[in-house]
Amino acid sequence: MGTGKKEATRRVRQGKDGKDGMGNIKVKGENFYRTGARVKQLNIWKEGRAEHNAAGEVTKAASYQSKETPVARIEPNRKWFTNTRVISQDALAKFRGAVEEQKKDPYSFLIKQNKLPMSLINDNKGKERVDGLLQHAAKIKIEGEKFGDTFGPNAQRKRPKLAVSSIEDLAASTDGDLHSYDEKRKEAAMLSGQTLDEEPENDQAYFLPDAGMLTSAREAIFTKGQSKRIWNELYKVIDSSDVVIHVLDARDPLGTRCRSIEKYIREEAPHKHLLFLLNKCDLVPTNVAARWVKLLSREYPTLAFHASITNSFGKGSLISLLRQFSALHSARKQISVGFIGYPNTGKSSIINTLRNKKVCTVAPIPGETKVWQYITLMKRIYLIDCPGCVPPSMTDTPEDILLRGVVRTENVEHPAQYIPAVLKRCATRHLERTYDIKGWEEKPTSTAEEEEERPTKTDKVRVDESIRFLELIARKSGRLIKGGEADIDGIAKLVLNDFLRGKIPWYVPPPKTEGAEAEEEEKAKGRDAKLGLTGKKRKAEEEAEAESGSEAGDAASGDEEFAGFDEDEGEGGVSLVVDEESGKNEAKA
């Protein structure tokens, strides 16, 4: 009865009151008593239990709890490969060759590398040189070995060689090592004539000369540019830049080159573009700057630059290059260009030159820029100035660090000890012309005609020459202290500042390359063309000279063969005399 009431109310509720004559008609599949959610819940309760037999064993497992693995086979379908790209081996080999050729060219860049199959192109090259991949390969090798090959009686791995077999033997060997160490200390004290103290900390012989320790501590000023704050600023600039410009000093490009930073960018950020900018090219001859640009361009694009707001050089080329990079990255709203390098190489001056006004503080001393700063060059190009950083090196001496302009000369305690290095790098005639003095050099005992090479000076001779050089400048300029003695340290700081600021001409000559001789031949051909000597005419003249020379040689020597010139032959021959001093000055000009 209740069922009928519920059915009647349902019909009224759904509008099936029978007025249209369809009240008693039931639709096929219509459920009058249970909703879909109710049926689903009932099925879960019914199927969620396992069926057991009389012994309690499971005859039919519950849903999703069966331990039997069904045997099935997935039918292959070509639709699996509809969203992939297929390439043949020949096409892949050609593509790899094209990419390798482009990588060798420093003036070409691979854009949108994330859309290229770089894993197929690189082919895991350099796996053995990268620490992470090398450890991964070793781990795979260990995991792939059998247990019996690693442990047990049939192990094939090398065992460590131990000289002792127990803890007692190890303690006895330690006592023997201590005894031999004490004997070495006593022997070193006897040989050096020093007293031996029982405490190693108070013993002078404890610090042996071959122990790898410095005889004198390096001044703290020579660690400038290596602080954690500076390196944090550097990495912020590198991470924020799309183009990194490495500023080099044209007088010493290799000395002011940060190879560790180049390696970091090449390995950790290969998508960033690295350039070399040879600043202060006005302080070196034009041919030297051109040779350095040609030499460095083999690794990275290199430009010569002279930073000056009023009279600059290379500004148009640099801006044009930055516009090209901006066009390459047209998908971005703007690109950032970071300037990195040694202190006092002119990074802030270059930014001022590009903006044609003073937007960064500059000074002829290192350490003027403290933090990084953003400067807008144009709408799509931003410049980032960075403090100068000095990568740590075990081969750089305090002389090298000071003469590269890393530290301030007024903070050096004994500046006179670095003047011999200045005299060694600079030409004599340039120093004479700059300070208007002469006579500090020690005259060699032999003339240049008697010796082919100029004799090398000892350290003692160079120190004496530097002292005479500083005294002459001090007396000429009136820099004297109490007692009429020359102010050696003050004049030494003055000379170092003149050396670093370009008042004294000097530069490091570029190394000779293999194609230098070919270039000289090309220049000779160009001179011949200017003089009107064509190729046929030059060849005819050379043949005539060779024939006349051979006839004269036959008449003079007869049937005897030419044995060559003797080293001790001083008379009866033609010798070419070269003025070594002028040649040296030209090399250092």
Image (cartoon, rainbow, N blue to C red):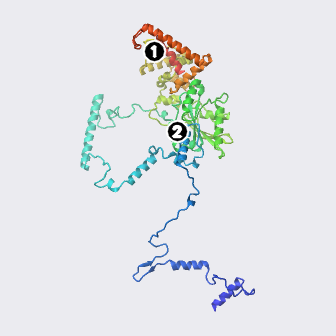
The 10 Å Cα crowd at callout 2, few under 14, some 14 to 19, many 20 or more, is: some
**Mark with earlier residue (2, 1):** 2
Residue at figure coordinates x 48%, y 29% from the top left: 400
How far apart in space, not on screen, are marks 2 and 1 (Cα)? 44 Å
Among all residues in the image, which is located at the extreme bottom? 1
Residue 474 appears in the rendering:
no
* Quadrant in which the N terminus is drawn: bottom right
The residue lying toward the viewer, choosing from 227 and 433, is 433
For mark 1, give the secondary structure: loop
**Disc 1 residue type?**
Glu
Look at the picture and state if 93 lies above or below 80: above
Look at the picture and state if 141 lies above or below 388: below
**Badges 2 and 1: C-beta atoms under 8 Å apart?**
no
For mark 2, give the secondary structure: helix
Among all residues in the image, which is located at the extreme right? 19
* Quadrant in which the C terminus is drawn: top right
Q: Which mark is residue 442?
A: 1
Residue at figure coordinates x 39%, y 54% from the top left: 144
The residue identified by callout 2 is: 262
Count of labels shown?
Answer: 2
**Disc 2 residue type?**
Glu
Where is residue 357? Give x, y as percent. 68, 33
The residue lying toward the viewer, choosing from 527 and 287, is 527
Residue 433 appears in the rendering:
yes
Where is residue 184? Give x, y as percent. 28, 35
